[in-house]
């Protein structure tokens, strides 16, 4: 089978590459290969009753399939260069923002209209944060919510399915460079294309490493973010979340000068398990539909760890810590903040005495046995700092779930078109190490599609 363009991965990066390619040139023969399932077949077996925790499905429906890792996400679409990736370093700040806005418009056309766009512009919280040694980052945030995000994906798929060949449950094993074009090898078949867009996200990070090794594409890697997910009554943060929805707040610790930041805030949301390469970590999401909302807000507190020579395996370091929590807790561990600072583990009895009802069924335990001291000290300092702008954060019953790890794919060497040293081979989205968000990944997809369409 021959194609003009083969896209590997049907996450936001792959989807928006396909969308823009067929929009700009409907004559192009485009195929998308996706190791996960079609959208309607993506079902996580955890039902809270019969199956309470991750059973390690062959293809994780949370991370893989049409919609990628973002399909069941909270759909927080951040229009900013301040976080979510460094796409702007390649394509320029204005271009990056323009592309993120363009994708936002498409999301609105395909089911997202009526959702709210929050902004930090002119907010009084910036001053309040600075007065308390905290720094609020600038962004506009479209909150689609898990439910609307899914509808947008359904509508985009309906639009694309007759224009693009989708191969679901079809992992690509390798990519070979030919004299002209590329050969994409799957289990039973191989396919030839002129140009290839690789957009395999975080779940494809290990595979991406082999592709770069085989094709001699230079990479670098030195960062991992490690921390916990905090859950507390929604009232504690409601003054911030009502106005901003999500606030990205950064704090520099007094003890070590490390930066700790809030990440992925989910007002009235739920804490969820995440399976990355067989390791169970924690994440969170929330719904736009009030009927599905909870009484709690959750967000991550993450400490960035940058390593210098000779250590190179930053993801391996994060994985080892997450594995330790899996070993002790059989999955995710949860601990009351009061228990943590008193140096004792949380137990089922202590959890029952608590005024908080956890939204995730995790094992009560002791996070100090898992997290390195430096990281734990940073998180505790940040909780006390946040308590000044959101009193109640440092309450004894505030729950900490661990481990939350944000793995960064190694950064792949690409040029301003996101093209590798091999002409016609593009690497985009989270798999490139350049983006870490729905908005940046989608924008990178549109960017390469425009470059390819202009060259046809
Ligand atoms: C629970 C959760 C909540 C999140 N919430 C948000 C949020 O609110 N806002 C935000 O900005 N970001 C959020 N994110 C991050 C966001 O989902 C990602 O940044 C984004 O999906 C990256 O898009 P991508 O296309 O680069 O990769 P992905 O979305 O990871 O898609 C890559 C796809 O490639 C497929 N693939 C991998 N290897 C192969 C192979 N060899 N062959 C074929 N297919 C392959 C995978 O199955 C996957 O479907 C969240 C992530 C998770 C897990």
Image (cartoon, helix red, strand yellow):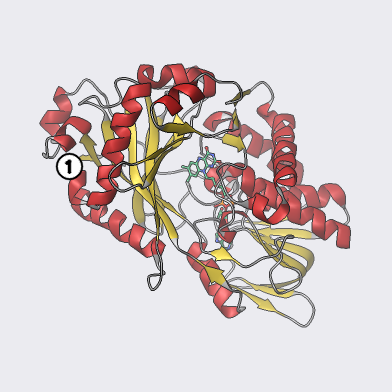
Q: Residue at x 76, y 72 (%)?
A: 423
Q: Position of residue 235 (x, y in %)?
A: 37, 16
Quarter containing the N terminus: bottom right
Residue 233 makes an appearance in the image: no
Residues packed near mark 1 inside 10 Å, few (<14), some (14 to 19) or many (20 plus): many
Which residue matches tag 1? Answer: 365
- In percent of the image, x 81 and y 60: which residue is there? 452
Taking the spot 22% from the left edge, 26% from the top edge, the residue there is 397
Q: Of residues 222 and 31, which is closer to you in this image?
A: 222
Above or below: residue 338 compared with residue 364 = above
Q: Quadrant of the C terminus?
A: bottom right
Total numbered badges shown on the rendered structure: 1
The secondary structure type at the circle numbered 1 is loop
Q: Is residue 410 visible?
A: yes
Cβ of mark 1 under 8 A from ligand 1? no
Where does the image place residue 128, in percent across and percent down from the top left? Answer: 44, 22
Which of these two is toward me, 153 or 123? 123
Query: Could you say where residue 329 lies in the image, as x and y percent from the top left?
Result: 21, 48
Q: Residue 426: horizontal and vertical position, in percent?
A: 70, 64
The single residue placed furthest to the bottom in the displayed view is 179
- The quarter of the displayed image where residue 181 is located: bottom right
The residue located at (74%, 81%) in the rendering is: 178
* 325 sits to left or right of 455: left
State the image quarter where residue 5 is shown.
bottom right
């Amino acid at each position: 089978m021959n194609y003009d363009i083969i896209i590997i991965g049907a996450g936001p990066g792959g989807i928006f590459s396909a969308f823009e390619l067929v929009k700009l040139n409907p004559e192009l023969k485009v195929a998308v290969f996706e190791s996960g399932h079609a959208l309607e077949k993506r079902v996580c077996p955890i039902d809270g009753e019969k199956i309470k925790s991750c059973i390690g499905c062959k293809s994780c429906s949370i991370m893989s399939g049409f919609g990628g890792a973002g399909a069941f996400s909270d759909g927080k679409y951040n229009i900013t260069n301040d976080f979510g990736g460094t796409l702007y370093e390649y394509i320029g700040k204005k271009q990056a923002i323009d592309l993120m806005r363009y994708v936002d418009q498409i999301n609105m056309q395909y089911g997202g209209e009526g959702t709210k766009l929050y902004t930090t512009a002119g907010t009084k919280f910036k001053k309040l944060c600075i007065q308390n040694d905290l720094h609020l980052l600038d962004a506009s945030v479209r909150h689609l919510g898990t439910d609307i995000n899914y509808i947008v994906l359904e509508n985009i798929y309906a639009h694309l399915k007759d224009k693009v060949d989708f191969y679901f449950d079809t992992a690509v094993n390798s990519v070979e460079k030919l004299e002209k074009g590329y050969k994409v090898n799957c289990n039973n078949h191989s396919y030839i294309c002129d140009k290839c867009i690789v957009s395999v996200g975080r779940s494809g990070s290990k595979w991406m490493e082999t592709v770069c090794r085989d094709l001699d594409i230079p990479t670098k890697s030195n960062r991992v973010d490690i921390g916990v997910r905090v859950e507390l009554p929604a009232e504690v943060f409601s003054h911030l979340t009502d106005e901003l929805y999500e606030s990205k707040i950064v704090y520099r610790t007094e003890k070590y000068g490390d930066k700790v930041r809030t990440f992925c805030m989910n007002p009235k949301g739920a804490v969820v398990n995440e399976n990355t390469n067989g390791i169970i970590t924690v994440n969170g999401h929330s719904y736009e539909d009030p009927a599905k909302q909870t009484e709690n807000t959750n967000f991550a507190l993450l400490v960035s760890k940058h390593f210098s020579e000779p250590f190179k395996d930053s993801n391996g370091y994060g994985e080892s810590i997450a594995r330790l929590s899996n070993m002790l807790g059989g999955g995710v561990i949860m601990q009351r903040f009061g228990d943590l600072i008193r140096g004792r583990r949380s137990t089922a009895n202590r959890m029952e005495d608590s005024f908080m009802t956890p939204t995730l069924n995790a094992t009560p335990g002791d996070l100090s046995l898992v997290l390195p001291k430096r990281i734990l000290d940073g998180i505790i300092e940040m909780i006390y700092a946040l308590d000044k702008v959101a009193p109640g954060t440092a309450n004894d019953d505030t729950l900490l779930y661990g481990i939350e790890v944000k793995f960064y794919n190694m950064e792949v060497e690409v040029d301003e078109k996101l093209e590798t040293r091999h002409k016609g081979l593009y690497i985009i989205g989270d798999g490139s190490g350049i983006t870490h968000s729905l908005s940046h990944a989608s924008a990178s997809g549109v960017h390469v599609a425009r470059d390819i369409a202009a060259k046809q």
